Image: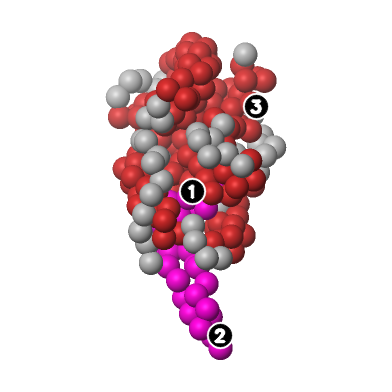
Amino acid sequence: MRLVLVASVAMALVLPGCGEKVPTLPEEAVDRAATCGVVTAATLREKAGVKGDLPAEAQERIFHYALLAGSEGPVFDNERANAVFQRMPGLFDTTIKGKWQVLQPACATAYPATAQDKPALPDSKLDSALQCYVLTDFLRKAFGGQGASYGDATIKLGVLNTKLDAKVSPLLKSAGVAPGDALQKKRGEALAAVAKLGQPQAVVKACEAKYE
């Protein structure tokens, strides 16, 4: 899931009366999420004055759009999330030009979970532990495609993920969820749910506070 942000989506409309092109979000779900990922990357880079790799927490905010795109249904759609990751590189050059900043509030409206920085984990022991487990697993794999700069983040997430696995396994067994299709569905439901709780880095911190 390497994000090398580079070039191509046409999404400019003509503003009535002045002929000036104003960018708008695409209607198609994958392009919309990928566009907001690109806008977020550019916004964070501009604020921090960063030319190289962004900090891990900033990358997690970009990952969130792929996570949310895959979570529109009750069960996480991995193919749709991967499509968002793959789409981002081709959108950068045609998105981040002109008045691209006008897309920031549009993205916030389209994806309100990205503004939530105080998420609350579920009360259920199984749901809470499983949601933390699948989120850390998703982020760990996403960082795995980002190169050596994110090695520490990948390792840290892996350590937490292993701790969560030890807690989740007996809870699943007690709930009668056996390996196979039932487990995959349960994990998919958990990932779709945790995506909507709030910013991934904030959810991970809540998981760390509860389980480390």
Please tell me the numbered disc located at residue 186.
none
Residue 28 is covered by the magenta coloring? yes
The residue depicted at 59 percent of the width and 64 percent of the height is 102
Give the image location of residue 194, x and y in percent.
53, 36
Q: Which residue is mark 1?
A: 37
* Mark 3 residue crowding within 10 angstroms, few (<14) / some (14–19) / many (20+): some
Give the residue type that dot 2 points to: Cys
Query: How many neighbours does mark 2 have within 10 angstroms: few (below 14), some (14-19), or many (20 or more)?
Result: few
Q: Which label lies toward us, 2 or 3?
A: 2
- In space, the residues marked 1 and 2 are separated at their CA atoms by 29 Å
Residue 90 appears left or right of 196 = left
Q: Amino acid at mark 3?
A: Ala
Would you name the residue on which mark 3 appears?
A: 206
Residue bearing the label numbered 2:
18
Magenta segment range? 11-40
Q: Secondary structure at mark 2?
A: loop
Q: Secondary structure at mark 3?
A: helix
Residue 50 seen? yes
